[in-house]
Image (cartoon, rainbow, N blue to C red):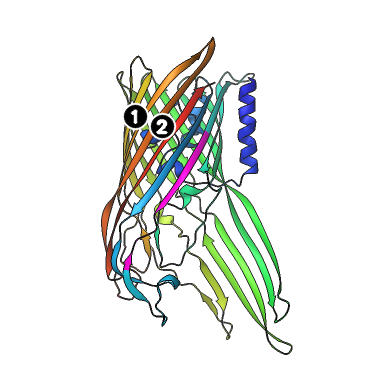
Amino acid sequence: MPLMRLLWAALLISGFYSPPLSATQDQNYGLSATTSGRVGSVAAEPHNPFAALYNPALLAAQPESLFGFGTSATAARFSTFKGVRLDSARFRTTDGASRSGDYTPQGHSTALWAVGMTYPFSLRGLVDRRAGLGASLSGPFQSLRTFQSQTPYDFYSLRYGTSDTQFKGTFSAAVEIIPERFYVGAGLSLFISSSGNAETTIASENPTGRFALDVGLNTAAVAGAYYRADSFQWGLVYRQEIAPQFEQRFRGSIAVGEGDAMIQPLIFRSTLYFEPHTIETEIQSDLGPLVASLGVSYQLWSRYRPSYLVAETKDARAQTLTTQEPGLRLHDTWSPRASVEMPFWERQFFASLGYRYRPSPVGDYSGAGNVLDSNTHLFGVSLQNEFAVGGGSPLRVRWGIYGQYHVMETVRVHKASADYIGAPGYEFGGHAYAYGLSLQANL
């Protein structure tokens, strides 16, 4: 199959020569008409070219190879906070004092792409079983990665505009355990962490410096199981926590007199973004006129690491000074979801509808931090058309359009102290949406 080999070579090259990172584009918006219209309810859906990420076990259960491509435009908008305390370099008055005023959290919009491929095959030799390989790549068009670290008191969104705008690469494999019944699979999502050292001498005439940066390639596991019996299917997926770290050490030497110098060490640390440990399970049934699925996702947000920029240095008495981080109490969440897919017009068209309730893990908004999140309702819809290429070719193509709309419930925040940023309080709410096109082919 020359076409299959060519496509796999392109995927592997892009995976090795692009900075591989993990991101939640697949969880926030989906990667194609099927995954987005069904709000991610595809852990038990074998006809999915992005199975390497959504459930690796499906790779061995597919009857033929699949290739998929999706592109979408996304945006998130938030409500304006009225008369809140603002405290950063942007909001200080001319005399250096902090002030109060209206503030609208920065919205976010981007254009995203996704490519997925699966390659099922038969094992020959010792066992007579099916197996499969798969890859899923996604990210924004305008950049490969975008990292943002802020002070512990800035207003920032927990989910939108952070880890959903990173390049992501996942490679998986699967094997059949019970013929035509039970399958297992596993894979790796790739991401980077980095650290560095810098040294500079600031003199009056000739400043000099040195800089070194180490970039490490790390992996996070994804594993799944899939069982099918007649018109019933069941899927189980585990995704490992991802929290890539950045650390930069700086040592500055400043001339303060004839032959004298002041040494100032600095260390900057940050968690670039965070994805929690996630366990998902789903059941799906072919009811004839439609395919229905019910699922739930459990996420361990209690281990959350914020993307604050933490600075550490020493004062004139050699005492260590470090950024004071506000305590954030996040709790684990259960997120239920449901979807239906309805074929019509002699199975040439497919319509999908999906709903997901995503509770916020933020339990206390009254502290000094201002992480923005609320209970969110996700609605998805898609329409796809499948046709045969003809001319004696077995190739079938499915193209589709899709959209999602996210409604964030309004949260009324009351700060425990008038000295906190955001005091005396505010109402947070907003919405997000995505719409796009996808193309899928049976190879």
Task: Residue at the far top: name it.
Answer: 392
Percent across and percent down for residue 13 are 65, 37
Q: Residue under circle 1? A: 352
Q: Residue at (54%, 23%) from the top-left corner?
A: 65
Percent across and percent down for residue 128 are 57, 18
Q: Is residue 150 visible?
A: yes
Task: Residue at the far front: name it.
Answer: 94
Q: Residue under circle 2? A: 33
Q: Quadrant of residue 28?
A: top left
Q: Along the line of sight, which residue is nearer the eye, 183 or 71?
A: 71
Q: Does dot 2 land on a helix, a strand or a loop?
A: helix
Q: Residue at (64%, 63%) from the top-left corner?
A: 196
Instruction: Give the alpha-carbon distance from disc 2 to disc 1, as whole Å.
Output: 8 Å
**Residue 347 falls left or right of residue 18:** left
**Residue 71 falls left or right of residue 209:** left
Q: Quadrant of residue 356?
A: top left
The verdict on residue 114 being magenta is: yes
**Residue 85 falls left or right of residue 255:** left
The verdict on residue 336 being magenta is: no
Which image quadrant: the N terminus?
top right
Above-or-below relation of 440 to 236: above
Q: Tell me which secondary structure the magenta stretch mostly adopts.
A: strand
Above-or-below relation of 377 to 135: below
Q: Along the line of sight, which residue is nearer the eye, 225 or 102?
A: 102
Look at the image and give the residue range highlighted in magenta.
102-115
Q: Earlier in the sequence, mark 2 or mark 1?
A: 2
Mark linked to residue 283: none
Q: Residues within 10 Å of mark 1 (few under 14, many from 20)?
A: many
